[in-house]
Image (cartoon, coloured by chain):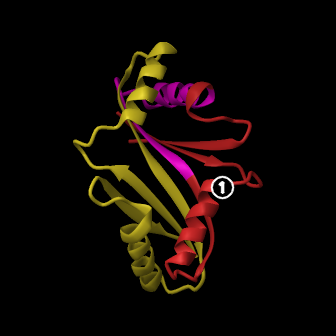
Chain colours: A red, B yellow
Amino acid sequence: MKARVHVTLKNGVLDPQGKAVHHALQGLGFAGVNDVRQGKFIELELDGSDVEKARAEVKEMCEKLLANTVIEDYSIELA
Amino acid sequence: MKARVHVTLKNGVLDPQGKAVHHALQGLGFAGVNDVRQGKFIELELDGSDVEKARAEVKEMCEKLLANTVIEDYSIELA
């Protein structure tokens, strides 16, 4: 089974990486960009086919390793 | 308008960051993980409401800045 995890900074947390991308886009002439936020995208290939078990396990991975839940949110998609 | 861009390493390109996450997950006892790939997730807030124009512009941003198309693929979602 495949799991797709998005890890994004919470609203209100400064995103220097996004700011740098925004600035670079403006330098390249892309004037119509108002904001850029950069996050992480993690694809996991998992054993088994029990969706609910997989979701619980990936949630635990996010809490323990993949996301810093003080400043980051995560979302999980399974396919 | 919001654009969501996923930038992922092409198949066959080594992903040391994904390998490190995989190794760390195994160290934490998550034995059912077969592979991990890590990519980038970029959210852009754009002016205007013309979807096709926005898609063309974001594609150009990907080609010029957001992705290294030698080793990375990108996909664009607009909402």
Magenta-drawn stretch contains A60: yes
Q: Is residue B55 above or below residue A60?
A: below
- Left or right: where does residue A37 sit relative to residue A3? right
Q: Residue at x 54, y 76 (%)?
A: A27
Q: Is residue A50 above or below residue B40?
A: above
Q: Residue at x 51, y 30 (%)?
A: A58
Magenta-drawn stretch contains A7: no
Chain bearing mark 1: A
Q: Quadrant of residue B38?
A: top left
- Left or right: where does residue A68 sit relative to residue B32? right
Q: Quadrant of the N terminus of chain A?
A: top left
Q: Is residue B44 visible?
A: no
Report the span colored magenta: A39-63
Which x, y percent locates residue A66?
55, 33
The amino acid marked with disc number 1 is Pro
Which x, y percent locates residue B61?
44, 72
Q: Residue at x 61, y 48 (%)?
A: A8
Name the element at disc 1: helix
Report the front residue among B61 and A76: B61
| Residue highlighted by disc 1 | A16
| Residue furthest right as drawn | A12
| Residue furthest left as drawn | B12
For disc 1, the neighbor class at 10 Å (few under 14, some 14 to 19, many from 20) is few
| Residue furthest front as drawn | A27
- Left or right: where does residue B42 sit relative to residue B63? right
Q: Quadrant of the C terminus of chain A?
A: top left
Q: Is residue A50 above or below residue B61?
A: above
